[in-house]
Image (spheres, rainbow, N blue to C red):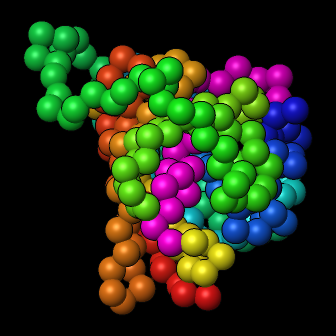
Amino acid sequence: MAYFERVDRTRFRATRHVSGAWDPVDQHIAPALGLLVHAVELDRGSRGSDHLGVGRLSFDILGTVPVGIVDVAVRVRRPGRTIELVEATMSHAGRDVVLLRAWLMQAADTRPVAATSFPPLAPPDEMEPWDPTDVWPGGFIASAQVRRRQSEPGRASFWVRSSTPLVRDEPVSDLARMAGLLDIANGMTVRADPGEVAFPNVDLTAHLFTAPRGDWLGFDTTVSFGPAGLGLTSSVLHDQDGPVGTLAQSLTVRPR
């Protein structure tokens, strides 16, 4: 079974594999983010704009959403031949729940100058398997395969993959599939027991300098809590060829 099943052109049914970590009756937002990226890529292809690559994915999470049917809409906010700003919205029962703004930029051959100073991540086979269901409930967390090397609470490197398709019987790009894993970062190296402190993220922004490929998505992650209810989860993203970009999530930190 997949995370989502298409109902019609704009509607999708979430399956039990989407159930969340904070409350299993609600969706874990990670697959929803992948679904919005998939919708943006389908829209891009329908407009003949496949020459534009995705440079930024910025999501605002407007509220919780039950495990049920959601609507997805896409519109181009800033059209252009070389740069576009595309917006995608997920709604449930007429209420917007997630907003994506994606910058699409013209591809070019920059291999002669391609480089990064982000350090490499140890490959998945050099990290120990770790079971995140020891910390978190829900169908999405149960569907994830994780290999992790933790330095201390709130600081770890890890690899994540899932064999669960994003959309049933529908081809999905590596980017959309991996976007459906991004939001797992906030829970893979907890700084505090989630039974004692809640720290959900209200947004997620990924900046990419190359499109991720392959099955595994790597994270080099640091979780920080401030003294006044704010937090930040920061990650450098990797595929098995090396670093691909960065990720940031703003947290609302709430002692229970």
Residue at 45% in and 24% down: 126
Number of marks in the rendered image:
0
7 displayed left or right of 110: right
Task: Classify 200 as above or below 108.
Answer: below
Whether residue 130 is visible to the viewer of this picture, yes or no, is yes
182 displayed left or right of 145: left
Whether residue 38 is visible to the viewer of this picture, yes or no, is no
Task: Classify 143 as above or below 138.
Answer: above
29 displayed left or right of 99: right
Q: Give the percent coordinates (x, y) of residue 226.
A: 33, 80
Query: Does residue 142 show up magenta in the picture?
Result: no
Seen as rendered, the residue at the extreme left is 113
Q: Nearer the viewer, residue 19 or 84?
A: 19
Residue at 52% in and 45% down: 182
User: Where's the C terminus, which quadrant?
Assistant: bottom right
211 displayed left or right of 192: left
Bounds of the magenta segment: 168-192
Q: Nearer the viewer, residue 239 or 88?
A: 239
Q: For residue 70, which quarter of the picture?
A: bottom right
Q: Give the percent coordinates (x, y) of residue 98.
A: 60, 61
Q: For residue 219, which quarter of the picture?
A: top left
Task: Classify 19 as above or below 31.
Answer: below
Q: Give the percent coordinates (x, y) of residue 1.
A: 87, 32
Q: Give the percent coordinates (x, y) of residue 113.
A: 11, 17
Query: Does residue 190 show up magenta in the picture?
Result: yes
Residue at 33% in and 87% down: 227
Residue at 38% in and 37% down: 237
Q: Nearer the viewer, residue 166 or 243?
A: 243
